[in-house]
Amino acid sequence: MLSRRSDLAMEARRIWSEENPGELEGAEEETRSDRGFSVVTVRVTGDRAAEELCKPKGTYVTVELGRFLRREDDAFSDGAQVISGVLRRLLPEGEGTVLVAGLGNPSITPDALGHLTVKNVLVTRHLRERSPREFQGFGSVAAVEPGVLGTTGVESADLVEAVVKKIRPRAVIAVDALASRSAGRVCTTVQISDTGIVPGSGVGNARAALSRETLGVPVIALGVPTVVDAATLALDLAREAGSELDAQALRARSAGMIVTPREIDANVAGISRLIGYGIDLAMHPGLTVEDIDLFLG
């Protein structure tokens, strides 16, 4: 089992390969390019692989945001289309509402990804119900921001479950911030999986899971690493400099400290908009980025 846990399946698989000889059976990785974005798919199919990687069996797709971060021409539109395509492949087919759950604490910038993403989602369920003819070209989308236990007194999973029971969506898209074990992954990738999510697990504050087992509907988890474990960062920097530190002592002294980039405000704002537009394009296939700009504006 991994000595360094990561929310990212791609990263977890590579950490395992560094720590163990041979191949891990039941964990397949495939890399392709889509509109200039690198897309890495990890499929966890075996029980041993799930245990070794600390990941439920399922599909994990990581979109690397290099073009978007370099502000290349059409990178925002292309990136949103790439995310949209992944979501369409993972979402179950059929009619019905999709519920977008923006998880996290909006008062803490690295944890505000879900909150800001919901602001860029076109919610249409009420419009479809009231004017089905006028909005027949749109998908049915609802959104909820359950907040965090410390401010609401209620588990996020419980609030989402209550909404699911009320509106009976065909699927839930849960958006949350993740934790990486590599500084180079922070705010540079989007992971989309069909396995659900455990809010707060990456920073050692795991809450109740949102998954098909707990909610009764498929849950697509969409997350971005916004923080990195301080002790792991120090160990990696030391190794790059040719030094070795006492990992156990360092982790004890760091007391669970996490680190985030100084430009985290701009990063989270930009990536949450990209994700929100990706969800919109997936749910409303007839729209363009320009159309979404108009509706949200």
Image (tube, grey):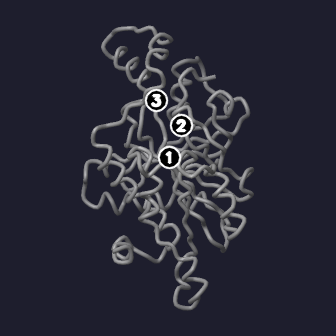
The residue that appears at 52% across and 25% down in the rendered structure is 15
- Closer to the chain start, of discs 1 and 3, is 3
Which residue matches tag 3? Answer: 181
Whether residues under marks 2 and 1 lie with C-beta atoms below 8 angstroms apart, the answer is yes
Q: Which mark is residue 7?
A: 2
The residue that appears at 39% across and 8% down in the rendered structure is 244
Quadrant occupied by the C terminus:
bottom left
Q: Mark 3: which amino acid?
A: Arg
Q: Mark 2: which amino acid?
A: Asp
Which residue matches tag 1? Answer: 191
- Closer to the chain start, of discs 2 and 3, is 2
Q: Label 2, secondary structure: give it.
A: loop
Q: Which mark is residue 200?
A: none
The residue that appears at 52% across and 90% down in the rendered structure is 134
Q: Nearer the viewer, mark 2 or mark 1?
A: 2
Q: Label 3, secondary structure: give it.
A: loop
User: Residue 178 at x, y = what percent?
Assistant: 49, 41
